Image (cartoon, coloured by chain):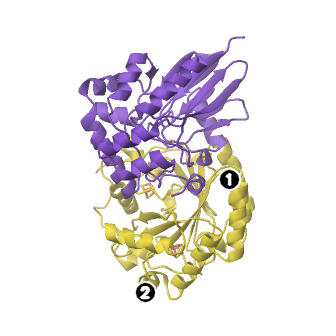
Chain colours: A yellow, B purple
């Protein structure tokens, strides 16, 4: 039997919030947590929930906060949640861009101007055009995401566009250049792009394939483990505190109910860990 | 009461023109001591000139990721970029610098400490490159909140932490009276449309005072030497205009919005 490597908790720098639970207004074929309009596996977090964690995080010296779902802007308290967070540190929101109405964008602009810390929006695209994007995300999604991006451009919020490897050719120079041109076409003069690998769990497991048994981390030095994001992050959901933003449907990845309880090593025995390891993934921007 | 003035020189990036102007300014102000914070090479031309000058003037300091890489024979600068375009330009600088730095200086770089502790008026001052915990960590103002900085001061038992690496200067006074200072860099302008560069004067008396001092230097001479050495036009543009054209993807939203590109 091989021994399973453990990732140490180096320092809690990054705190994630599953702020919309697993609820999303769409149902992407590659979503690694299978979010959908009906998936209530994890629930919404309230402003009070987030504030309680922020108090803990302040004591622990957390550096930055990330909000994801599902779709964060399905949470009706999203703006007050961001306002509370930005008093304490920088925040990033991962969104599909579809709910970025003009009024929300104006409120985001006000939050940005009022805080000494950065607020970043990350908008996911899966193709250069309607056809490729909607093939993964569903009919009509491209159109609404484009409106959202234009609304952001109007208030001069420059998002980071994230593209998964499901998008054709994104790893090539040419593919990158095409995406950068697309981003520029909205009027963003400083295009920002991040490419993310796919995790073969959740819906993605059905779209392509599951992890094979050999896709596990077998040997690793403790110092190498420091490059893994789970050596410096934790994820808060309605069910408790998990090791990372990827394994929230893995019951053993729930490490406790307070942040302090989770500041200990974690065994990297999952297929997704293999992807993090070989791709050097970080979900951070 | 005793007052100590400490000049802090952030990343120099082979900009020996700016270094000469900075050293003249430090002399004129009569600082008690001066320290460099690493990243002596990169970006600019003739990488031997900076170590030559620092050694000649007897200025002490610490390693940056550049000195760590050059002295260990590494094949890249370990700057910590994640974007392909940023890495492309970082590699050009590194290859040029590695090829043109003489072995004596590479060995000397290997003897530099990674951090230095000073004490002035009972205040514990810690000099680091990226951050005390990581040589290539970027500490930006808009992503370095007070609770995080407080934790770092606790962990490293310091009342004043000094760093550089990111290229933009800032200073935060924490509620408990401790300080974190990014000393900025004298290697290239601060992405604000000015051609000057910045260094830092720390004054420790009863209280702590931090001043960021602009340095004008002969940037035209630097630009023409960079052209003669066939360094990328993008780098030269930064020297001539004061706006960053590369290494932009590591900037957080606020800092990115403040620049032109
Ligand atoms: S990938 Fe994002 S947008 Fe798509 S279903 Fe999952 S949470 Fe929703
Ligand atoms: S999935 Fe990735 S981030 Fe999560 S525990 Fe495994 S290695 Fe760490």
Q: Residue drawn at (30%, 67%), measured in percent from left and top?
A: A212
| Residue B57 drawn at (x, y percent) | 43, 17
Q: State the mark number for residue A156.
A: none
Res A209 quadrant in image: bottom left
**Residue carrying label 1:** A53
Question: Up-down: is B139 above or below A14?
Answer: above
Q: Secondary structure at mark 2?
A: helix
**Is residue B207 toward the left or the right of residue B118 in the image?**
right
Query: Sequence-wise, which precedes: disc 2 or disc 1?
Result: 1
Nearest the eye: A216 or B242: B242
Instruction: Measure the C-alpha gap from mark 2 to mark 1.
Output: 41 Å
The answer to whether any part of residue A265 appears in the image is yes
Frontmost of labels 2 and 1 is 2
Question: Up-down: is A9 above or below B10?
Answer: below
Query: In the image, is the residue at mark 1 within 8 Å of ligand 2 by its beta carbon?
Result: no
| Residue A63 drawn at (x, y percent) | 59, 47
Q: Residues within 10 Å of mark 1 (few under 14, many from 20)?
A: some
Instruction: Read off the chain for label 1.
Output: A
Mark 2 and mark 1 residues within 8 Å of each other at the beta carbon: no
| Residue A265 drawn at (x, y percent) | 47, 45
| Residue B118 drawn at (x, y percent) | 55, 19
Res B120 quadrant in image: top right
**Residue carrying label 2:** A131
Q: Residue drawn at (36%, 54%), measured in percent from left and top?
A: A277
**Is residue B66 toward the left or the right of residue A155 in the image?**
left
Q: Residue drawn at (30%, 61%), measured in percent from left and top?
A: A215
The answer to whether any part of residue A220 appears in the image is no
């Amino acid at each position: 039997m091989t021994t399973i490597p453990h990732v140490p908790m180096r320092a809690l720098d990054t705190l994630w919030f599953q702020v919309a639970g697993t609820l999303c207004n769409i149902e992407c074929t590659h979503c690694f947590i299978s979010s959908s309009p009906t998936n209530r596996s994890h629930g919404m977090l309230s402003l009070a929930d987030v504030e309680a964690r922020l108090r803990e995080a302040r004591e622990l010296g957390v550096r930055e906060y990330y909000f994801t779902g599902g779709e964060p802007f399905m949470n009706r308290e999203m703006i007050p949640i961001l306002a509370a967070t930005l008093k304490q540190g920088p925040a990033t929101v991962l969104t599909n861009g579809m709910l970025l109405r003009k009024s929300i964008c104006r409120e985001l602009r006000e939050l940005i101007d009022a805080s000494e810390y950065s607020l970043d929006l990350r908008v996911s695209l899966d193709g250069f055009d309607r056809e490729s994007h909607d093939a993964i995300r569903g009919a009509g999604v491209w159109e609404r995401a484009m409106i959202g991006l234009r609304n952001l451009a109007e208030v001069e919020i420059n998002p980071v566009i994230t593209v998964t490897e499901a998008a054709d050719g994104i790893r090539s120079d040419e593919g990158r250049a095409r995406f950068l041109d697309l981003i520029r076409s909205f009027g963003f003069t400083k295009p920002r792009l991040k490419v993310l690998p796919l995790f073969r769990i959740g819906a993605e497991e059905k779209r392509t394939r599951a992890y094979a048994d050999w896709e596990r981390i077998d040997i690793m030095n403790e110092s190498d483990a420091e490059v893994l994001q789970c050596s410096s992050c934790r994820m808060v959901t309605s069910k408790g505190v998990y090791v990372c933003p990827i394994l929230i449907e893995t019951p053993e990845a729930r490490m406790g109910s307070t942040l302090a309880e989770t500041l200990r090593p974690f065994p990297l025995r999952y297929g997704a860990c293999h992807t993090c390891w070989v791709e050097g993934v970080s979900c951070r921007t | 009461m005793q007052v100590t003035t400490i000049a802090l020189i952030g990343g120099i990036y082979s900009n020996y023109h700016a270094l000469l102007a900075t050293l003249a300014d430090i002399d004129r102000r009569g600082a008690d001591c001066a320290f460099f914070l690493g990243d002596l090479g990169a970006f600019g031309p003739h990488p031997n000139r900076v170590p030559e000058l620092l050694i000649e003037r007897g200025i002490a300091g610490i390693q940056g990721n550049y000195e760590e890489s050059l002295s260990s024979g590494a094949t890249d600068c370990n700057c910590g970029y994640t974007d392909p375009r940023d890495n492309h330009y970082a590699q050009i600088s590194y290859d040029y610098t590695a090829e043109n730095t003489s072995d004596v200086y590479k060995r000397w770089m290997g003897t530099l400490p990674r951090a230095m502790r000073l004490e002035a008026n009972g205040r514990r001052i810690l000099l680091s490159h990226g951050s005390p915990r990581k040589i290539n960590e970027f500490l930006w103002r808009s992503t370095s909140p007070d609770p995080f900085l407080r934790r770092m001061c606790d962990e490293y038992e310091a009342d004043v932490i000094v760093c550089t690496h990111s290229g933009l200067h800032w200073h935060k006074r924490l509620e408990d009276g401790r300080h974190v200072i990014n000393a900025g860099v004298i290697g290239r302008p601060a992405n604000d449309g000015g051609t000057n560069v910045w260094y830092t004067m720390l004054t420790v008396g009863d209280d702590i005072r931090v001043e960021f001092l602009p340095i004008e230097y002969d940037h035209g001479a630097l630009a023409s030497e960079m052209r003669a050495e066939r360094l990328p036009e993008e780098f030269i543009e930064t020297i001539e205009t004061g706006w960053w054209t590369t290494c932009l993807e590591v900037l957080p939203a606020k800092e990115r919005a403040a620049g032109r590109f």
